Image (cartoon, coloured by chain):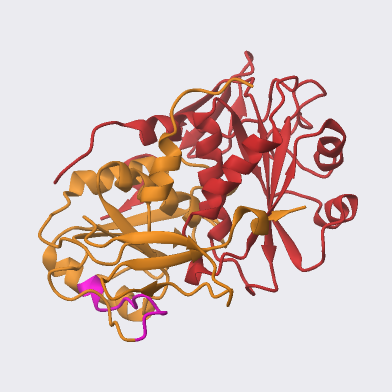
Chain colours: A red, B orange
Amino acid sequence: MPVKGGNVIADLVRNNRSYRRFYQEVAIGHDTLKALVDLARCCASAANLQPLKYLLSCQPDRNGLIFKHLAWAAYLKDWQGPPEGERPSAYIIVLGDRTIAKSFGCDHGIASQTILLGATEKGLGGCMIGAVRRQELREALGIAKHLDILLVLALGKPKETVVLEGLGPDRDVKYWRDSQDVHHVPKRCLDEVIVP
Amino acid sequence: MPVKGGNVIADLVRNNRSYRRFYQEVAIGHDTLKALVDLARCCASAANLQPLKYLLSCQPDRNGLIFKHLAWAAYLKDWQGPPEGERPSAYIIVLGDRTIAKSFGCDHGIASQTILLGATEKGLGGCMIGAVRRQELREALGIAKHLDILLVLALGKPKETVVLEGLGPDRDVKYWRDSQDVHHVPKRCLDEVIVP
């Protein structure tokens, strides 16, 4: 089988962790967000309907409106999300246009992963956030009713170390932070996810 | 904003088209499929539950069992799918384990896109197929009842040219093939998918 050189995807996938603390002072430009959406625009979509729309934010005031309607890291009970100074410097809100499709399958997963891999390549990182107070966010940003809020992608220059590790004897998948604030993420091993 | 060099993701995304005709004689090894699943294994998953499982196939007889339960390219009414000789040389069936999660969000989109980008880097290509006769496929392969069939990823060495283009005046998103068998895929432009 012909195999082209390079192992870029493996490195990007490994570096593309869910980051929740950022160098907030490192701004992300509107053009960068547009370039990331342009990647998503070219991706596969069920029946090629392309029902996804994207709302961009990279200005501090707008970022603040978004931030307060997000829930962060459900497993970290003692942490209420990044403090001022460590918050995302940009967001891409992934919307589903119900005038185009009734359901969105996994289109938003395809698009969001592509955006985050593109961000990783640029030295950025982020987190797909599904725990969103949707009605409040809709009102805060004036999002039209025909657009479902599917995911909020938080973006910034990562300010934390995230390590993958195997599941422990208790088989727990909850991520956790150690005393050095290193974020540990248990992942199932390859043998466990391949059906024999 | 610091931007790392390279534009690898943009090239991979552009080359990662939905291919439906392959050099069937170019085999894909089991180890290649495992390496692709290993990429997906390290991806984000809602609440880190990691409910996805993967069934691999790269042997002609097993491939044949899978092929006959797939529907191909709904918009190409005169084409019943690739003929013998142009069929996929491997499959990864993405399953959702209901003993781990009740729903799978867009985890399978994240995983499938990652697998296909990894395949593209290796000079391969494929197609995410959702139009599957699930019950028949389940029986043919003996897939356990607690595993939902989410997507079938067809893989092979692509044997067709796929081009992206803008939507025409009729705004139709249906892909089509020209007289040279070039596959044309209309994509919405960037301005259309960004909410102002």
Q: How many marks?
A: 0
Give me the residue at 34% from left, 46% from top.
Answer: B37
Residue, far left: B25
Q: Nearer the viewer, residue B14 or A188?
A: B14
Q: Position of residue B159 (x, y in %)?
A: 21, 61
Using the rendered image of the protein, determine whether residue B121 is visible from the camera's viewpoint. yes
Q: Position of residue B168 (x, y in %)?
A: 54, 71
Using the rendered image of the protein, determine whether residue A191 is visible from the camera's viewpoint. no
Q: Nearer the viewer, residue A47 or B165?
A: B165
Q: Position of residue B127 (x, y in %)?
A: 35, 62
- How would you classify the magenta stretch by its main secondary structure? loop
The magenta segment: B65-77
Is A25 covered by the magenta stretch?
no
Q: Quadrant of residue A49?
A: bottom right
Give me the residue at 62% from left, 24% from top.
Answer: A158
Give me the residue at 62% from left, 30% from top.
Answer: A19
Q: Quadrant of residue B23?
A: bottom left
Residue, far top: A180
Q: Position of residue B33 (x, y in %)?
A: 25, 48
Q: Nearer the viewer, residue B60 or A99?
A: A99
Residue, far bottom: B78
Is B66 covered by the magenta stretch?
yes
Give me the residue at 27% from left, 77% from top.
Answer: B81
